[in-house]
Image (spheres, grey):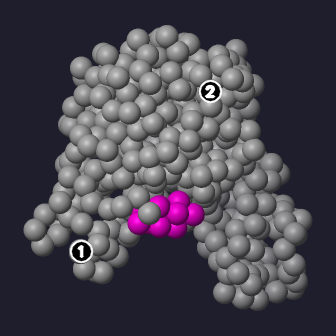
């Protein structure tokens, strides 16, 4: 299991408690509080059906122009498709949290994950907040408690960290997330199952923070899929406390570039952890799609392959059925000529310019596909567009988990 080894960002405290929302009886309410209102940027699901905390979170972010003092997450209940009552529950949560953490209600950011359509027992959630307040701390145990409490079908905690040295100080990044199923994120502008929380002590304004978040998310969380289902609750939130004293608008460009690189690395590691812990996953597959007119076209084809049940079930048994890959690319809606296409699996060429490769060795490809991780590269040979997309196989265990999820 991963653990937190580096120093955490200054200006934040974390805690987790049991509220009795999860049927398992495990910790199910996670709280993060900034010493002062933090700069914030967020990307929400593009699903037209959104959970109540997404609606209220959007509203609060607009009201404060990107300032968050407290983050309250509950696991075990998505508070989605619960009607006006669900909105009231999210608002009541923010109101009570504001009282306890001494901030305006609209500086509280709510998040929920779990089963859809079941009323969230707000009395259990709000009753747990004073206990959470008493446990707040800026240390490894508290941050790991937070990262663990947000889990649902996850089998392990997902965290990542970074630290950058400035001439006079240091800047730290801490990220955690949850997600194992219903993973096919489509995150966009403020607009149950992938929740990502990023914390840094960099001093930066919300607008600048948003400009950093969008490309980091596009190359990581928007480039993964377990099952192609875009959750009603997907959220990526980044908070910047400013407690390091390092100001974004004052540091050298080289430091800004390094920060962006480290933020991207943290996002990439968390995104990989989501796929690696996907429900029933036995193989993690990187789709390296290239040679298209632009990156958008490449990602469309990558998603088509990643979401194909026929491709995913073949991967589960290490079946080198490259025809399914070519077929899924063909119905993606992006024009291409098959005679320009090459496909390699685990570095072994299987398809070469419109035909099965002359040296195709099924046994060798099967052996490559038995590895836990491998890459399938598809080159369309007609342009600079490229997409690296992380996905996985579809197994009987995934079916069992999701067939019995609500019961």
User: 210 or 376: which is nearer to us?
Assistant: 210
User: Residue 267's quadrant in the figure?
Assistant: bottom left
Specify whether residue 6 is in view: no
* Start-end of magenta stretch: 208-218
Whether residue 3 appears in magenta in the rendering, the answer is: no
User: 231 or 335: which is nearer to us?
Assistant: 231
Q: Residue furthest left?
A: 168
**Residue 94, position in %: x, y?**
46, 28
**Residue 166, position in %: x, y?**
17, 70
Callout 2: SS: helix
Q: Mark 1 points at which residue?
A: 250
Callout 1: SS: loop
Q: What is the distance, in whole Å, between disc 1 and disc 2 at their CAs?
A: 41 Å
**Residue 83, position in %: x, y?**
72, 24
In the image, residue 255 sits, relative to residue 318, either above or below, namely below
Q: Mark 2 points at which residue?
A: 87
User: Residue 78's quadrant in the figure?
Assistant: top right
């Amino acid at each position: 299991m991963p653990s937190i080894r580096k120093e955490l960002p200054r200006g934040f405290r974390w805690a987790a408690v049991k509220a009795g929302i999860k049927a398992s009886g495990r910790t199910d309410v996670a709280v993060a509080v900034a010493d002062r209102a933090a700069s914030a940027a967020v990307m929400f699901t593009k699903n037209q059906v959104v959970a109540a905390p997404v609606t209220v979170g959007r509203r609060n972010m607009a009201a404060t122009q990107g300032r968050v003092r407290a983050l309250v997450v509950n696991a075990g209940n998505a508070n989605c498709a619960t009607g006006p009552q669900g909105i009231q529950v999210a608002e009541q949560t923010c109101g009570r949290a504001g009282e306890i953490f001494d901030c305006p209600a609209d500086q509280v950011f709510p998040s929920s994950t779990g089963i859809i359509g079941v009323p969230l027992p707000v009395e259990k959630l709000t009753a747990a907040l004073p206990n959470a307040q008493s446990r707040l701390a800026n240390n490894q145990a508290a941050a790991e408690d937070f990262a663990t409490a947000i889990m649902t079908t996850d089998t392990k905690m997902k965290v990542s960290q970074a630290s950058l040295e400035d001439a006079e100080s240091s800047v730290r990044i801490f990220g955690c997330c949850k997600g194992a199923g219903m993973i096919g994120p489509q995150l966009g502008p403020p607009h149950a199952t992938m929740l990502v929380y990023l914390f840094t002590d960099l001093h930066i304004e919300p607008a600048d923070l948003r400009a950093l978040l969008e490309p980091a998310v596009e190359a990581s969380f928007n480039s993964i899929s377990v099952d192609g289902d875009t959750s009603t609750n997907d959220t990526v939130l980044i908070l910047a406390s400013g407690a390091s004293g390092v100001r974004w608008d004052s540091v050298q460009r080289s430091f800004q570039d390094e920060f962006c690189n480290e933020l991207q690395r943290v996002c990439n590691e968390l995104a990989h952890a989501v796929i690696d812990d996907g429900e029933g996953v036995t193989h993690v597959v990187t789709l390296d799609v290239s040679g298209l007119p632009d990156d958008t076209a490449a990602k469309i084809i990558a998603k088509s392959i990643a979401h194909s049940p026929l491709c995913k079930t073949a991967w589960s048994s290490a079946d080198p059925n490259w025809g399914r890959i070519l077929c899924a690319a063909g119905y993606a809606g992006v024009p291409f000529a098959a005679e320009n296409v090459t496909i390699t699996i685990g570095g072994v060429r299987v398809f070469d310019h419109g035909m099965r490769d002359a040296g195709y060795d099924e046994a060798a490809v099967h052996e490559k596909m038995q590895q836990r991780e491998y890459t399938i590269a598809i080159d369309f040979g007609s342009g600079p567009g490229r997409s690296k997309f992380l996905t996985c196989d579809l197994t009987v265990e995934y079916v069992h988990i999701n067939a019995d999820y609500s019961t």
